[in-house]
Amino acid sequence: MKSRFNASVRIIFLIGIAIGCALVVPRAAGDEAKDKAAAKNAPFDAISALTGTWVAVGAPEGQKPMTLVFKPTAGGSAIIETMFPGSDREMVNVYSIDGGGVLLTHFCHLGNQPRMRATSADNGVLNFDYVDAGNLKSRDEPHMDSVEMTIKGNQLIENWAMYEGGKVTGHHSFEFKRQ
């Protein structure tokens, strides 16, 4: 009698599992796209829209204008910005999705890697502020500490702030147009 009872319990258990599996509704093909659209990240979308090559406005006569190149990577979860490609001052910025925001890592020609987080995005102006840095013994050593990016259609202005000794010591501002 006991073994018939155990067999009945097993059958009921297996039927329950089968019914549970049948009730799982498969995701429609468009659901994933809808989920991504619902999870908009305005600062990252603004950086993504910069994909392509940008050329500095007002290069000194006889000199090659500075360029920037933006390109997506890592399945679209990061954007690589190469500043002044091919020059001895070439640097790389990586903009990556960080929850609902954006984290910027600046690989500087000074040999350090300051990380900045997008702290505001309003009317085409994105502000990134210092979080921490790689290869920097203290925040008081020279490094890029913040950047303000102004995006207006085919115009991009980057205003970088240099920091040293507890304060901002200078600004490096560049204006670019889409090539």
Image (cartoon, rainbow, N blue to C red):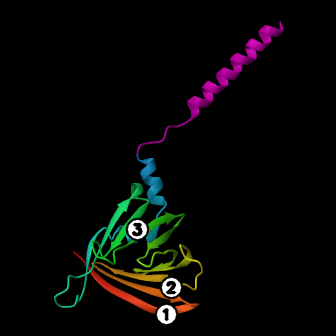
Q: Dot 1 corresponds to which residue?
A: 169
SS for tag 2?
Answer: loop
Query: Of marks 2 and 1, which one's residue comes earlier in the chain?
Result: 2
Cα separation between marks 2 and 1: 9 Å
Residue 123 sits inside the magenta stretch: no
Name which residue type carries label 3: Asp
Would you call the spot at circle 3 few (<14 residues within 10 Å), some (14-19), or many (20 or more)?
few
Name which residue type carries label 1: Thr
Q: Which quadrant: the N terminus?
A: top right
Residue 142: mark: 2
Residue 164 image point, x, y percent: 53, 89
Residue at x 33% of width, y 68% of height: 70
Name which residue type carries label 2: Pro
User: On the image, which quarter does residue 90 sit in?
Assistant: bottom left
Residue furthest top as drawn: 1
Cα separation between marks 2 and 3: 30 Å
Query: Of marks 3 and 1, which one's residue comes earlier in the chain?
Result: 3
Q: Nearer the viewer, mark 3 or mark 1?
A: 1
Query: Left or right: where does residue 84 sit relative to residue 23?
Result: left
Q: Dot 3 corresponds to which residue?
A: 45
The span picked out in magenta is 1-29
